[in-house]
């Protein structure tokens, strides 16, 4: 039986789009986020740590220290307005959305679903204490944003797996190698809710060093994961509660150094508050 809630398509991105994406990537300054805020107490039993990989978000930025968008328990003040998709990605997203609307069972596509959120994941090696550490993986998790999730891959092949909850060591339900320029889409309760997914490893066969250059890091794979956050849950930085703004202001300032979008977001912060927190 054909599964209408899972798509894998190799060679989805053509030469022209690939070249455009690579030159746009070179303009990005990804962030190394900390898991927790440096201003709020770290939850007991937890330790501050840097995320395994640098990331960039488009549409809205879900800072790790604010917790990720997770309806119904965490929907407000976690999806912070971010830059729009560049044209080349917007075009690909329009094709993907069409395909989902035509092919996925309607009950699994929320009414106002559109892919307004993109997490850009950089997979590779980081330099640590003079040693090279392979950080090209992501552990079992769910994406909580409603509706189908689409992902584009560039660079080395990644071994992507779906596993049953609580059974990380059992044989995976599905293993899919995600190739350079491929598209993967999954939705519906089976892939989104019942199973967790992970990137177990990323090959290192072509000595790749993908853009942008990131200090102390060599990127061999870039993944774009497109999701849907209801527009009413996307909040401009200036509208966040003051304490939450304090948590992420450092990141927004870093982003503002190379992004006119975030520069404007910072400038629109309420003035009296800005003065009192600096
Ligand atoms: O890199 C990938 O293919 C998957 C990334 C992922 O699981 C995520 O961003 O939630």
Image (cartoon, rainbow, N blue to C red):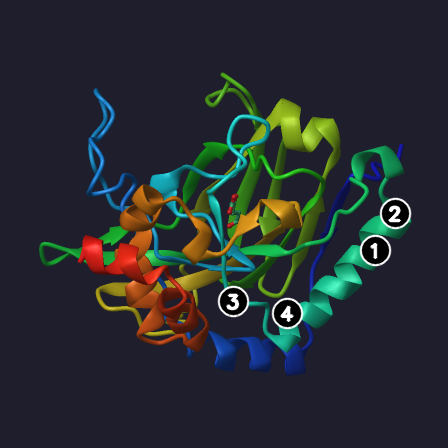
144 left or right of 110 in image: left
* Viewer-closest of 258 and 246: 246
In this picture, is 113 found above or below 198? Answer: below
Q: Could you tell me if the residues under marks 3 and 2 are in contact, i.e. CB atoms within 8 Å?
A: no
User: Circle 2 — which element?
Assistant: helix
**Residue at image location 64% in from the left, 76% down from the top:** 87
Q: What residue do we see at 71% from left, 67% from top?
A: 92
Residue at 22% across, 60% down = 275
Q: Is residue 258 above or below residue 238?
A: below
The span from disc 3 to disc 2 (Cα, nearest Å) is: 29 Å
Image disc number at residue 89: 4
Badge 1 or badge 4: first in the primary sequence = 4
What secondary structure is found at the residue carrying circle 3? loop
Which comes sooner in the sequence, label 3 or label 2?
Answer: 3
Residue indicated by mark 2: 103
Of 179 and 83, nearer the camera is 83
The label on residue 83 is 3
The residue wearing badge 1 is: 99
């Amino acid at each position: 039986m054909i599964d209408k809630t899972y798509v894998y398509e190799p060679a989805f991105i053509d030469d022209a789009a690939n070249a455009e994406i690579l030159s746009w990537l070179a303009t990005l300054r990804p962030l190394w986020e900390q898991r927790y805020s440096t201003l709020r107490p770290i939850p007991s039993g937890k330790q501050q740590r840097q995320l395994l990989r640098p990331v960039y978000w488009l549409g809205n930025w879900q800072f790790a220290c604010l917790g990720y968008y997770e309806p119904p328990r965490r929907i407000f003040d976690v999806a912070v307005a971010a830059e729009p998709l560049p044209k080349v990605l917007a075009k690909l997203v329009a094709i993907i959305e069409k395909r989902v609307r035509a092919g996925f069972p309607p009950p699994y596509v929320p009414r106002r679903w559109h892919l307004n959120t993109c997490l850009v994941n950089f997979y590779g090696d980081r330099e640590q204490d003079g040693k090279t550490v392979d950080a090209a993986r992501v552990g079992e998790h769910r994406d909580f944003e409603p509706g189908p999730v689409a992902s584009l891959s560039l660079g080395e092949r990644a071994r992507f797996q779906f596993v049953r909850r609580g059974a990380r060591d059992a044989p995976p339900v599905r293993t899919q190698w995600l190739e350079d320029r491929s598209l993967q889409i999954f939705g519906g309760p089976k892939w989104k809710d019942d199973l967790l997914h992970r990137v177990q490893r990323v090959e290192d066969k072509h000595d790749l060093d993908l853009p942008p250059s990131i200090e102390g890091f060599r990127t061999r794979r870039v993944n774009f994961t497109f999701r849907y956050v209801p527009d009413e849950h996307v909040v401009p930085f200036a509208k966040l509660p003051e304490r939450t703004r304090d948590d992420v202001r450092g990141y927004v300032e870093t982003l503002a150094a190379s992004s006119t979008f975030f520069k404007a977001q910072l400038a629109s912060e309420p003035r009296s508050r800005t003065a009192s927190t600096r």
